[in-house]
Image (tube, rainbow, N blue to C red):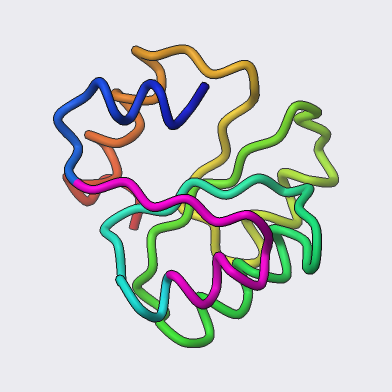
Amino acid sequence: MLRHILNESPVGTVFEAIDGNQAVEMYRLHRPDIVFMDIVMPGKTGIQALSEIRAHDPSARVIMASSTGTSKNLKAAIDSGAADFIQKPFEREAVLKLIRRILEGEWE
C-alpha cells in the first residue's frame, strides 16, 4: 500500500527492504531523503534498524509505521530518533503531507 502511494506520487526513487538488516544496508548504500520503516520486521526490529541508521547518520529522517500505534511503540520510536510515526492503514494525503513536512525541515 505505501509503495503504491509513493510510486504514484512525485517523490523520486523508492527502495524497498525485506527486513531490518536489509533496511540498514540499503540506507548506507543509497542515503535516501526519507525512510518509512515498520516497527515489526523480520531479522531486526524497525526500532533496532532505526537505531543503527541514526548511529551511522544522525541526520537520517526515518518515519516509523505500525498497525498498532501503542504509546510504548511511539515512545520507543521517538526515543530512538524517529522523525515521526504513522499508523497503518496508510492514507495517501496523510503520507504526502508528512513527506512535505519532513522535507521542509519541520521535524528537527
Q: x, y (%) of residue 106?
A: 27, 45
Front one among 12 and 86: 12
Q: Quadrant of the C terminus?
A: bottom left
Residue 12 sits inside the magenta stretch: no
Please name the residue shown 40% across and 80% down the image. 28
Front one among 50 and 11: 11
Q: Quadrant of residue 23?
A: bottom right
106 vs 49, left or right, is left
Q: Is residue 22 positioned above or below 85 on the image?
A: below
Please name the residue shown 69% across and 58% down the image. 46
Q: Is residue 3 positioned above or below 83 on the image?
A: above
Q: Is residue 106 positioned above or below 8 on the image?
A: below
47 vs 65, left or right, is right
Q: Is residue 54 positioned above or below 39 on the image?
A: below
Please name the residue shown 47% across and 50% down the image. 16
Q: Looking at the image, which residue sits at the far bottom?
A: 56
Q: x, y (%) of residue 105?
A: 22, 51
Q: x, y (%) of residue 54?
A: 50, 76
Front one among 57 and 15: 15
What range of the chain is rendered magenta? 13-26
Front one among 106 and 99: 99
16 vs 67, left or right, is left
Please name the residue shown 52% across and 21% down the image. 1
Q: x, y (%) of residue 75?
A: 74, 51
Q: How many marks?
A: 0
